[in-house]
Image: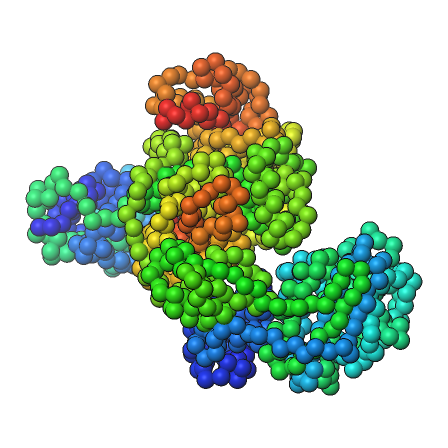
Amino acid sequence: MSQVFHEIEKKIITSLKETSKQTPENLEKSTNLSPDQIRRGIEWLKLKDLAIVAESKTSLLSLGKNGIEAFEKGLPERRLLDALKDGPKKLAELQKQLGPIFGPAMGLARKNEWVEASSEQISLGKIPSELPGEKILKNIGTNKISKDQINENELSGLLKRPDFIVEEIVKTKEISLTTSAKSIELSESSGAIDVEAKVPEVFVARTHPLKDTIDEIREIFVTLGFSEIIGNMTQSSFWNFDALFTPQDHPARELQDTFYLDKISAKKIGNPEQIKKVSESHKKNWRYQWDINEARKMVLRTHTTCVTIKHLAENKPDEARVFSLGRVFRNEKVSYKHLVEFNQIEGVVVGKNATLRDLMGIQREFYKRIGITKIKFWPTFFPYTEPSLQTMVYNDRLGKWVELFGMGIFRPEVTKPLGITKPVLAWGGGIERIAMLKYGLDDVREFYNNNLDWLRSATKCQ
Amino acid sequence: MPVVELSYSRLQKLIGKASKKQISESLPFLGLDIESEDKDLVRIEYSPNRPDYSTDFGIALGMQGLLGLKTGAIKLNIKKSKQYAISVKSDVAKIRPFVTGIVAKNGKIDDKIIKQLMAMQEDLHFGIGRKRKKSSIGIHDLDKIVFPLTYKTTDRNHKFIPLNSEKELSISQILETTDVGKDYGNLLANSKKMPLIVDANQYTVSFPPIINAAVTTVTTKTKNLFVEVTGINKADAEDMLSVVATILQSAGFSLESVQISGSQNSSPKLEPKKMKVNPILVNQILGLNLNPAKIISSLKKSRLDAIKKGKEIECTIPAYRFDIFGPMDLVEEVALGYGIQNLEPQLSPSQTIGQTNSISQNLKSLSNIMVGLGYLEALNSSLTSKRVLYEMANREDSQTISVQDSKSQEHTILRDSILPGLLENLSRNIHESYPQKLFETGSVFSLENPITEKTNLSCVSVHKDANFTEIKSVLNSLLKIGTGKEIETVAEEHSVFEKGHSATIKFENKKIGIIGEINEKIKENYKIRDPVIGFEISLSDSILKSF
């Protein structure tokens, strides 16, 4: 027997085994359950095919105003006969004693020869021990009685009399057990619970799905031998642009792409040697008047590369693997594709034997670990790397190639002025894009909407 | 990135012997991204360092190389001519000192070519011209001009019929009423005198860098072209001219020289430059083992010339390839000619041991404890608005850090607190089931030296029985697990909290944050019915380190 019963179901089954057909009201009394518990229990048993609910229409009888009076004081004809018990009486006297009921009572009594009437007086005739209708009155009394429990011939007399009997039609339910239910041995399933039933939802507390993706990416690069460095989101233009060989009149530096902080300039942007060498490289290669005040302007970093280049300029390592991960900013219109603030990872490998193929190998390994195997590399352009590539990954859900990380080798025009002598492989890109693939999102804004419904239910799809 | 619209059938004609499929598959390996395709039309995104790719002529040259149909450098054949000259007056020196130019003859001009030339001109103006500041270009119908020309200055009352106009306008009117005048007039704002190119009969040819005269407009009836470039330095102006010259030659025009003299100006040579690259560097950077012959053939596929010179390879770089600064750029040209798809990625063993930054590590442990306490992690932008940060959260706006000209009203100032953002999050979730508990860690900003960034933690809880005790318990448990020490809460009013239900958090006798029951007014602002409790603390290095 695999079936398990709730306590309510057990009580209903037990009661129905004793009395086979019961109305819900009866079951309430026999089981001591509330109407709501009975209702639910019957529903459950019905779904399991263990109970039958038969609905029927019943005619219920109760006494009307005159019927109640007759029940309390006797039928008018009975009251007439009672008044004659002690001997014959004069018509006028009886009329006075009995009031309005005298007429109908007298008519009925004479018709049935219960009284004999002469011109002077009225006396008793042959009287049956029980008058027609009296039994029904007694049966109904102050209750409601089903019509089929009463003799119809007897009833017809009373039904003809005004306001004696009130008849109403009601729907009734009768519960009975099905054949299979009758064979249930309740003792067998006692103590077990219904493990298959549906349960209410509980909401988990969790870290943010985007943070989970960030942690996953961080961990992959740590296991590939990279150390994490962190830096400020507010940076001088010097480190965000100048040190990366982006000329001061370059369109990428303009207000429309970059968030410049209002009326804030950096006092110290680098050591004099760095400033001198960087400015010379700009003047020579880009042929313009380099302006230190332009380099002092504070910006919200447009990439995390400013953090790594500063780290390399300060430490000048011969051999290193470092990465930086954090928020970057672009002055763009917010849309399903673009945010003004998003996360970027950016890493570098420094080493005398570092090659472009190594850089591609690190990318391929990274993608493999986040579950992306279909990748290819295309040439591209960045102002501070040469050669420059971008990764394209195939997205099955979208059915197309999607651009992910960019990469390249830092230009000598970037490294030389800062005293970095070994080749520097660099790569980087947005994290939200990867997280969108992971969580199957089409709108990047969802990550920052803090919509509880999504946060509580977001699941990985890749 | 700039975009150019091309047609496959035209490209096929220009390239010769290439299928549509071959072209479409090879475009990315020239560094060109296909943005969209519609039958014969294709929109291509190209890099701003390759303005020669702004026309199908330039792309065809590159594609011929990549497919091995025509390799080696494109040579400019410029016929020396004494017919065309520009003399420069010394008074332009202070405004826009340099002019250069070339003549292109006997070409066929149709609507498509005009469209391509216009697009190229726009791109050159925007990119290497730095919005016409560094250099700008004018393309004219040669046969409408009587040489020699003079590059000189004039005053703002000078009148001529500018392009797209039917009547004469003065320079002042042009600057005030036309679109180009309004867009680029600022380049001349510091000068009383205006630069002008006039022909032998004193008719205006061009008012650089703003607009040409209408009379020289190029139409489908034009056969011969005159191109002039003006700029603030000679090299930039000649770079721009070299792109136009190369494109016009590949479009079928014959080039003829223009003599330029006066005030430090001289005739352009547009000669290729020589540069050496060592095969060792090529192989070291690419991780390959290519012999010099293979390197040379790869460079030729990138439309450069190369020969072996001792141990090195000497390249001849056409003038229009001014994006090549040094040997490293040549390494990239080798890679492109060799084919990026032929480079096999390799995973070399790491010589270093990786490590997570301790701050990231500690923040992660702290977040895990917050999750254990039943809090869901939220993420908000650190660039937010006055409305969220101050108005809705009932806070004083003190020294705000704003960004200039944000395109989004919701992102105009850097946050100095995380709590207001979380309150806004609650207001967006009033239809979701309760209790709602959120936390966030992140940077907050203050105006010190010049800007200081600190890491804060904030959390909020809302449900019908929320009260001060609950939130203090959460704070206490968190810091006790981290540091093993108790916090103190000292009664003090804070505008975000309800009077008498508000405190300052002290840890080891230092104020580290605030805690309390959120003010009724804020709840009303955000239409939140149930009680809201919360705190925000600054995670100093010593606190963070203990997690």
* Quadrant in the picture for the N terminus of chain B: bottom right
Which residue does the image show at 27% across and 58% down from the upper left? A56
Q: Residue B206 placed where, x, y %?
A: 80, 69
Q: Residue A318 placed where, x, y %?
A: 39, 40
Q: Residue B194 placed where, x, y %?
A: 85, 60
Which residue does the image show at 65% across and 36% down from the upper left? A264
| Residue A450 drawn above or below residue B219 | above
Which residue does the image show at 51% across and 41% down from the upper left? A418
| Residue that lies at the very extreme toward the top in this rendered image | B509
Q: Is residue B498 visible?
A: yes
B328 vs B139, nearest the viewer: B328
| Residue B249 drawn above or below residue B242 | below
B63 on left or right of B522: left
| Residue A338 drawn above or below residue B237 | above
* Quadrant in the picture for the C terminus of chain B: top left
Q: Residue A102 placed where, x, y %?
A: 39, 48
A242 on left or right of B357: right
Which residue does the image show at 65% across and 29% down from the upper left? B398
A239 on left or right of A407: right
Q: How many marks?
A: 0
Quarter-of-image position of residue B317: bottom right
A276 on left or right of A90: right
| Residue that lies at the very extreme toward the front in this rendered image | B310
B164 vs A126, nearest the viewer: B164
A127 vs B318, nearest the viewer: B318
Q: Is residue B381 visible?
A: no
Q: How is the image coloured?
A: rainbow
